[in-house]
């Protein structure tokens, strides 16, 4: 009966005190705007960190986890330890090879798995980099460079040179950008690499890369796997690691367990390899959502206070409306309409404000450094963040106006008119 009239009354209430209405809308606007900014920035930073970890860490890594156990001796098999005590002085442990046996068969089998899109056999060793008077301890990884590029996107992380140079130049080496700077070498220079056992080889720098992780860029280099085998004096089947990239990296934990049981070697997934970083990402996500939720709730309480004050100031209007035949449900509808209108308008303005602030942060140049490969602050623009902001803004203001509107609907007009 009074449906259209109710909306007209709600409109009149909102426009009769524009400052009060604007303040209420701004409470929602700034709450949602700051929510969009915070969630976009923190999510962008976490995605950048996760992408960096994924590019530098294989989804699944298969390797031979060496475990030394000197608690037993061959004497235990000769003499009964229940009758005599065997004492071995200065035991000499046997040489343990960390290589994967039947590596080629495992690689061929992995390439047939539909879940695996890239397989990179590797041979890693600790080396000393020598360039003139400079000597630096680091790591050397022998790879099939094209497979490694598919695995880590190495071609996109090259600072100088190209990964293809490793295939065309004999004894070529790709060095981390930070490592090359420490050695003061550039493309075309010669460096000497020595192993802890004393063997050494000379390599020509054919390119430098930067993952954006100092612990890699400052110590790591790539060469062809055959060169590391030659440096270590091993045969062409000697492989210590097999790294894999999956179609769905979320399946890494399950796939790693399956491969470990199938091949009898240790298999680590990328989450296990970066456990500490994953914990920090989780903590940041929780903090982001807690702070964002708090901002929205505070905005909702602001609406609640304003709606309560509005009802308190319009008690006589409510009494007159009821005296003219308006029911309690009509009164609730009027004030709920005002609350939702404030929520919708505030939410829309909040989305625009959040987008503008996020775009402003995204356009800021990131300070240059040798540790993180990034040109601007990481910010995401996911649609579901904006959808959630609108939904939460409307729902919050709806509930914020619900209690005052119910209170307004129960007001006794006779008591008000009597004073």
Image: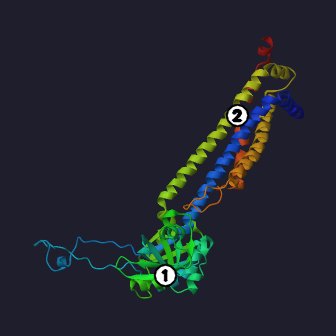
In the rendered image, which quarter is residue 13 located in? Answer: top right
Residue 342 seen by the camera = yes
**Residue at far top of view:** 418
Question: Which label was assigned to residue 400?
Answer: 2
Q: Position of residue 216 (x, y in %)?
A: 50, 67
Q: Nearer the viewer, mark 2 or mark 1?
A: 1
In this view, the residue in front, 71 or 38, is 38
In the rendered image, which quarter is residue 322 located in? Answer: top right
Q: What is the C-alpha distance between the residues marked 2 and 1?
A: 70 Å
**Residue at far front of view:** 133
Residue at (58% x, 73% y) in the render: 154
Mark 2 surroundings: few (<14), some (14-19) or many (≥20) residues within 10 A = many
Mark 1 surroundings: few (<14), some (14-19) or many (≥20) residues within 10 A = many
Question: Which label was assigned to residue 295?
Answer: none
Asked which secondary structure carries label 1, the reply is strand
Is residue 234 shown left or right of residue 178? left
Residue 332 seen by the camera = no
Asked which secondary structure carries label 2, the reply is helix
Is residue 201 shown left or right of residue 312? left
Q: Position of residue 385 (x, y in %)?
A: 69, 51
Q: Position of residue 337 (x, y in %)?
A: 80, 35
Residue at (65% x, 57% y) in the render: 376
In this view, the residue in front, 174 or 239, is 174
In this view, the residue in front, 285 or 363, is 363
Is residue 92 shown above or below 57?
Answer: below
Is residue 329 shown above or below 357?
Answer: above
In this view, the residue in front, 26 or 300, is 26
Q: Could you tell me which quadrant the C terminus lies in?
A: top right
Residue at which label 1 appears? 203
Q: Could you tell me which quadrant the N terminus lies in?
A: top right
Q: Position of residue 379 (x, y in %)?
A: 66, 55
């Amino acid at each position: 009966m009074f449906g259209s009239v109710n909306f007209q009354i709600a409109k009149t209430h909102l426009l009769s005190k524009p400052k009060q209405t604007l303040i209420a809308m701004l409470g929602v606007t700034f709450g949602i705007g700051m929510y969009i900014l915070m969630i976009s920035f923190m999510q962008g930073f976490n995605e950048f960190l996760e992408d960096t970890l994924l590019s530098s860490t294989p989804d699944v890594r298969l390797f031979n986890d060496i475990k030394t156990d000197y608690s037993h001796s061959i004497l235990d098999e000769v003499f009964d330890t229940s009758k005599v005590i065997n004492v071995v002085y200065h035991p000499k442990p046997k040489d343990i090879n960390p290589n994967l046996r039947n590596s080629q068969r495992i690689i061929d089998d992995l390439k047939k798995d539909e879940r695996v899109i890239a397989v990179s056999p590797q041979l890693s060793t600790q080396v000393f980099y020598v360039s003139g008077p400079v000597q630096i301890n680091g790591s050397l990884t022998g790879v099939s460079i094209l497979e490694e590029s598919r695995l880590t996107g190495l071609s996109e992380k090259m600072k100088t040179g190209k990964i293809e140079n490793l295939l065309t130049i004999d004894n070529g080496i790709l060095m981390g950008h930070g490592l090359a700077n420490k050695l003061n070498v550039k493309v075309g220079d010669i460096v000497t690499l020595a192993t802890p056992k004393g063997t050494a080889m000379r390599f020509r720098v054919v390119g430098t890369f930067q993952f954006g992780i100092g612990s890699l860029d400052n110590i790591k280099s790539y060469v062809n796997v055959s060169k590391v085998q030659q440096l270590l004096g091993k045969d062409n089947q000697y492989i210590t690691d097999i790294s894999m990239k999956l179609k769905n990296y979320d399946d890494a934990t399950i796939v790693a367990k399956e491969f470990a049981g199938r091949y009898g070697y240790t298999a680590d997934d990328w989450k296990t390899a970066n456990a500490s970083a994953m914990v920090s990402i989780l903590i940041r996500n929780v903090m982001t959502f807690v702070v964002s939720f708090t901002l929205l709730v505070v905005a909702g309480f602001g609406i609640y206070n304003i709606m309560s004050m509005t009802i308190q100031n319009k008690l006589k209007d409510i009494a007159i409306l009821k005296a003219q035949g308006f029911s309690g449900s009509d009164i609730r509808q009027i004030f709920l309409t005002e609350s939702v209108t404030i929520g919708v308008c505030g939410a829309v303005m909040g989305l625009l404000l959040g987008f503008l602030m996020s775009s402003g942060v995204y356009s800021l140049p990131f300070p240059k450094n040798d540790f993180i490969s990034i040109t601007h602050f990481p910010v995401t623009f996911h649609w579901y963040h904006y959808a959630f902001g609108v939904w939460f803004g409307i729902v919050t203001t709806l509930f914020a106006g619900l209690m005052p509107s119910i209170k307004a609907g129960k007001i006794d007009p006779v008591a008000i008119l009597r004073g």
